[in-house]
Image (cartoon, rainbow, N blue to C red):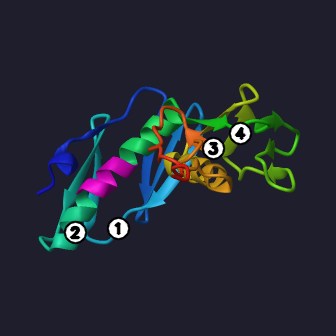
Amino acid sequence: MSRIGRQPVVVPDGVTVVLDNGVMAVTGPKGNLSRPIPEGIDVALADGEVHVTNTRSERRYRALHGLTRALLQNMVDGVTKGFVKRLEIQGVGYKAEQREFGLHLSLGLSHPVEYRSPDGVTCSAESNTVVKVEGIDKELVGHVAAEIRRLRPPEPYKGKGVRYQGERVRRKAGKTGAK
């Protein structure tokens, strides 16, 4: 049995959790999220806690047990606190600007990149070199941050590109001179 799956998900005040036809819906001050519950996993609401139990003993369902509990915890955290990812832009002339449609990124390409974020996620430029991605769905926030990073990943020789804040890029030595 999963050790993570055994722990109950505590539902704070102001958050409502509803289970309806195999779909878990969580509503809180920041919004609402819903996710289907996999077959073979039971979810029970009791005393302000959500308990996830596994009904089958196969390996697949044991893995889904802990995953389902973690996803429900992320939903509760998202509707109460939200999630934030920050990206750093490094390179001469590389910058990000806030526009009405989303972000206007200059990343050393032959053209500027206009990034439009999906519904539920807001992208903002805290400065010319720091982009903030925030929303209530942890999976979607991480996906948007990865899409922005993919536009110009950090290269190993000079370290230019878009990276997560705090990410360390392994640097390579350049060519050695002629002898």
Structural distance between the alpha carbons of marks 3 and 1: 36 Å
Q: Answer above or below: position of 63 versus 170.
A: below
Structural distance between the alpha carbons of marks 4 and 1: 31 Å
Kindly state the secondary structure of the residue where label 1 is placed: loop
Q: Nearer the viewer, mark 1 or mark 2?
A: 2
- Disc on the earlier residue, 4 or 1: 1
Residue contact between numbered discs 4 and 1, judged by CB atoms under 8 Å: no
Q: Which three-letter amino acid code belongs to the residue tagged 2?
A: Tyr
Q: Which residue is mark 1?
A: 38
Q: Which mark is residue 123?
A: 4
Q: Which three-letter amino acid code belongs to the residue tagged 1?
A: Pro
Span colored in magenta: 66-71
Q: Which residue is mark 2?
A: 61
- Disc on the earlier residue, 4 or 3: 4
Horizontal side of 173 relative to 48 (left or right) equals right
Q: Residue at x 57, y 52 (%)?
A: 146
Q: Residue at x 14, y 74 (%)?
A: 58
Q: Which mark is residue 162?
A: 3
Structural distance between the alpha carbons of marks 1 and 2: 9 Å
Residue contact between numbered discs 1 and 2, judged by CB atoms under 8 Å: yes
Going by the picture, which residue comes out furthest to the front? 179
